[in-house]
Image: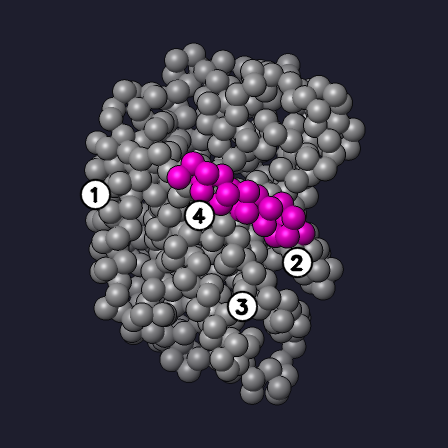
Amino acid sequence: MQQFTEIIQAISDFFWNNILLFLLCGTGIYFTIRLKFVQVRKFGAGFKRVFGGFSLRGKKADHRGMSSFQALTTAIAAQVGTGNITGCATALASGGPGAIFWMWVSAFFGMATIYGEALLAQKFRKVKDGQITGGPIYYIRAAFRGKFGKILAGFFSIAIILALGFMGNMVQSNSIGTAFQNAFGIPPLVVGVFVAAIAGFIFLGGVKRLASVTEKLVPVMAAFYIVGCLVILVINHDMVLTAFQQIFVLAFKPQAIAGGVAGVTVKEAMRYGVARGLFSNEAGMGSTPHAHALAKVKKPEEQGEIAMIGVFIDTFVVLTLTALVILTSEMLSSGETGTTLAQMAFNEAFGSFGNIFVAICMLFFAFSTIIGWYFFGEVNVRAMFGKKAIPVYSAIVIVFVLVGSALKVDLVWNLSDLFNGLMVIPNLIALLALSGLVVRISKGIKGKKDDQRFPDDPEVQKLMAEESEK
């Protein structure tokens, strides 16, 4: 089993580091150029759309979809996970402080990619079983008519159900169980029962309950973590400038010993920074469009602008704060990596409370990811197998959450990484094929050929018209 785990990890690492890394970054650069730096031009508009009418008690989600803010928080729920703590620490330990610079670069271009994903999710959403739904499975089928499109879309759906719905949620619950065992001595299985029970309650409530939970949970968890990090940075204020200096200098001129990381090269700093950044913000992976498809907006490009803010919050705010905490604590030289490194950094400032703080944040981050990933899988189960398969899918996810909390899941995590990568391929192929349509919609250009080839779903238009009348 150990040998099989190592083989899967080697395949996954090769796939991510040598193929997906360049495909994801390349797609981001391509969309940035074609959309004339939309992440810069429309950043202010997106920021205003997100926070202009901010409220923890927004419009209720129903069969017509979610509010834009609910769609964003559902997307962020999936984006901001254990990767924002563990993934960031791993990137620093393996790629040095310079890896953070390359995280920023990948996120900047990724904002253009996710703009395209959200726009297409809005354009090609459908009504299924009486409610609005959408995601890559629908715009993949639109991009490629016939058998090829169905195979490509089916491959994507199976990959995301396995990667996120099942295996991904298993390792998220494992992260919660481990963190609480370290901080409070609570057996992981006890934590798993609690997490599975709460998750099951939310799952049974459907989109309405899920949206209600994420719009409250995400702002609270983000504020809690951000405040904690800012307190540490105030305590370590004399090291903040040095930390930024390390990030910029070591991105291009790694030293023999870069903040405790021996023998780091520019290539390694770039590889770990880009890979971990993209894995965290999920730009181009095809996951968050499922949430953005449900947003109630007047034009598809409006949700694209909002989606960019999700990447900004995930990488430029949460990931950056984690990196600064670790760097200013000077724990990078400890030789530790992952969650342990993060815990040591927080302990340096908070004392024994550091473990508790990280455990609470892990609960928020990982649980929100479980909710988001479950929903993304559900959309594809509904599209592939119909409404009757949803209860079966929900039950399997709950079992995986429960069992995953107490198991050693190295193999499952590696398989999740691999399937995560596999689902990127059909998503990027469709994004590139529809890039011209993204540009035309962004410019407000309507053509007869586009209208004939990509007609709006009349049932969606009917439901949205009802919403407008109300």
Judged left or right of residue 299, residue 407 is left
For the record, the magenta segment spans 1-22
The residue shown at (23%, 53%) is: 395
Nearer-the-camera pick, 18 or 377: 18
Q: State the residue position of label 2.
A: 27
Which tag is nearer the camera, tag 3 or tag 2? 2
Q: Are marks 3 and 2 in contact (CB under 8 Å)?
A: no
Q: State the residue position of label 4.
A: 416
Q: State the residue position of label 1.
A: 197
Gap in Å between the C-alphas at discs 4 and 1?
Answer: 23 Å
Please rate how many residues cluster around mark 4, counting C-alpha atoms within 10 Å: few if below 14, some from 14 to 19, many from 20: many
Q: Are marks 4 and 1 in contact (CB under 8 Å)?
A: no
| Label number found at residue 132 | none
In this view, 349 is above or below 441 = above
Gap in Å between the C-alphas at discs 2 and 4?
Answer: 23 Å
The residue shown at (45%, 31%) is: 225
Label 4 secondary element: helix
Q: State the residue position of label 3.
A: 120
Lower position in the chain sequence, tag 2 or tag 1 = 2
Label 3 secondary element: helix
Gap in Å between the C-alphas at discs 3 and 1?
Answer: 35 Å
Q: Are marks 3 and 4 in contact (CB under 8 Å)?
A: no
Q: Quadrant of residue 402?
A: top left
Question: Is 18 one of the magenta-colored residues?
Answer: yes
Lower position in the chain sequence, tag 3 or tag 2 = 2
Q: Position of residue 322 (x, y in %)?
A: 53, 29
Nearer-the-camera pick, 410 or 26: 410
Q: Amino acid at mark 4?
A: Ser
